[in-house]
Image: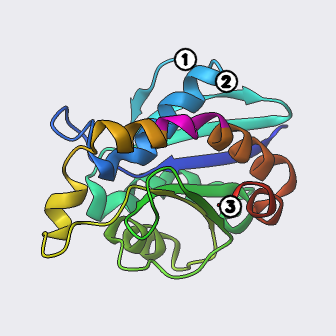
Amino acid sequence: MAALKAIVGLGNPGPEYAATRHNVGWWLLDALAEGWQLGRFRRQGNAAVASGRVGEYSVRLLKPLTYMNRSGAALAPLLKLNSFDPARDLLVVVDDVALEPGRLRFRPGGSAGGHNGLKSIESALRSGDYARLRIGVGSAPQGADLANWVLSSPSKADRKQIDEVVPDLIQGVALWMEEGTEAAMNRFNR
């Protein structure tokens, strides 16, 4: 039986959020599903899921459909699997306002850093011990409301910078599956 790897892209459901900075995790999952020919996302419980085989792994891409602050609810089916170890088998993809657009950071664990989606994941897991891929979306302008910033669309220039790193992101996720978070950090963190 192939080892399971789950990649969760954080975002919000609905067309009004599709192009927002907060949905950068969903953008990457769309690129992974296309690049790995996993087919369309289909609703399974609290998530839209695309799954299939990538190399020696059984891969599930999950887009929580619960809104950002309740993202952890989408993990319930995975947590019931005896063979699933979040520290080894889970990668959560999230927007990061502390990174410039297009910068990326793999991390083996750590704090939620004020991100409500990560807080929800940690609550569901009862642990912060899982890999994260943070994708830079840029910081809000001085005096701007952070919630409004992440729920707005990036400029064309910022979106271009994010789109340009998608090939690196896909390679980075593949390396994470094969060799782990540290290998992905060493090669792709910028």
Instruction: Name the side, left or right, on which 95 lies relative to 179.
Output: left
Q: What amino acid type should be assigned to the residue bearing mark 1? A: Gly
Residue drawn at x 27%, y 64% is 69
16 and 59: which one is in front? Answer: 16
| Residue 138, above or below 152 | below
Q: Residue at x 47, y 19 (%)?
A: 40
Identify the residue under disc 1: 39
Dot 2, how many residues are within 10 Å of its Cα: few (below 14), some (14-19), or many (20+)? some
Query: Residue at (86%, 34%) from the top-left corner?
Result: 56
Q: Quadrant of residue 108?
A: bottom right
Q: Position of residue 110 (x, y in %)?
A: 58, 80
The part of the chain drawn in magenta is: 163-167
Please rate how many residues cluster around mark 3, counting C-alpha atoms within 10 Å: few if below 14, some from 14 to 19, many from 20. some
Mark 3 highlights which residue?
A: 189
Secondary element type, mark 3: loop
Please report contact status of discs 1 and 3: CB closer than 8 Å, yes or no.
no
Q: Earlier in the sequence, mark 2 or mark 3?
A: 2
* Residue 80 visible in image: no
Q: Is residue 126 above or below residue 147?
A: below
- Three-letter amino acid code at the position of disc 3: Asn
Instruction: Compute the Cα span from label 1 to label 2.
Output: 9 Å
Q: How many marks?
A: 3
Which residue is identified by label 2? Answer: 36
Color style of the picture: rainbow
Name the magenta segment's main secondary structure: helix
Could you say whether the residue bearing mark 1 is in a helix, strand or loop?
loop
Report if the CB atoms under discs 2 and 3 are less than 8 Å apart.
Answer: no
Return the residue nearer the eye: 38 or 42.
Answer: 38
* Residue 164 part of the magenta segment: yes
Answer with left or right where residue 112 lies relative to residue 37.
left
Question: SS for tag 2?
Answer: loop
Local packing at callout 1 (Cα closer than 10 Å; few below 14, some 14-19, many 20+) is some
